[in-house]
Image: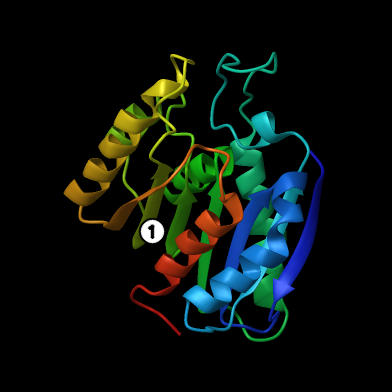
Amino acid sequence: MSFRVETFGNPDAGTILIQMVDDHDLEGMEQEVSAVRELSGKQEFCLKAVRTDRWNIDLSPWPAPAVFGKEDFGDSASETLAYLQNEIISGCRLSGTPPKRIILGGYSLAGLFALWAGYQTEIFSGIAAASPSVWFPGFTDYMRENRMHADSVYLSLGDREERTRNPVMAQVGNAIRTCFDLLKDTGTDCTLEWNKGNHFQDSDYRTAKAFAWVMSRSGGI
C-alpha cells in the first residue's frame, strides 16, 4: 500500500475534504477545487487528495470478480480507511487548529469507498459520493444491514450510466435508487442528483457539486 497526498485550498481551514484519487482525477483537481469554492459560496476548505495506484484493491470493501478488464477487486478498504484516520486526519488535528468537520468524498469506486467508510466510523460529518460504484456486488445489502454514521450524504449518477451492456454495471441505476431510499428511511439527510451523460463526463465538476452540497448542510462554516 502506497499513497501520495496533495493538498489544495487553505491548510488552516476548519473544513477538511478528503478524496481518494487516481492520475485522471489529479489532472482535473485544480478545476474541481475552483468549482467547490464557487459552488460553496467561497467557503474556506482544505482538500486532501490521496492518490492510489491500486484503485480496485485499495478502495474495495471486499473481494469481487472483475467486471471490466482483468483486474479483480480486492479487500483493502479497511487498511485505506485506517491510513486516512491515522495519517491524514490525525495529522490535521495535530497541526494548528483542529478541523471542525471532515467530509469524505470521491468519484466512481472512490465514491463507493466513501459511502462504505460512512458506515464504519463517526469521524466524517458528511459523505460526498459522486457516481459511486453502487453496482458493487452485495453493497446495497450491506447498507440495508448497517447504519450510516455521517449526518449528510450526497449521491449522484449520470442519466446514461445504467445504459451499458455490462450486466453488472447496468444495475447501477436501480442500486442508487435503493441506496437513496435506504438512507432516507433511516433519517439521514440525503439527496440524489441526476447529471446528464455517462459515467465519464465532467467527473471533476460532479465531484465538486457533491462536496459543495455536503458543505452547505448543517454545520456549515
Residue at x-position 70% and y-position 57%: 28
Residue under the point 51% across and 79% down:
100
* Position above or below: 70 against 110: above
Does residue 137 show up? Answer: no
Neighbours of disc 1 within 10 Å: few (<14), some (14-19), many (20+):
many
Against 184, residue 63 (above or below) is above
How was this image coloured?
Answer: rainbow
SS label for mark 1: loop
* Closer to the camera in the image, 98 or 23: 23
Q: Is residue 58 left or right of residue 23?
A: left
Residue on which disc 1 sits = 150
Residue in the picture at 22% in, 42% down: 181
Give percent across and percent down for residue 165: 47, 15
Where on the picture, by quarter, is residue 31?
A: bottom right
In x, y percent, where is residue 151? 34, 63
The residue type indicated by label 1 comes to Ala
Instruction: Give the quarter of the figure containing the N terminus.
Output: top right
Q: Position of residue 131 (x, y in %)?
A: 47, 43
Q: Quadrant of residue 26?
A: bottom right
Identify the residue at the far left of this view: 185
Query: Is 153 displayed left or right of 3 in the figure?
Result: left
Label count reads 1
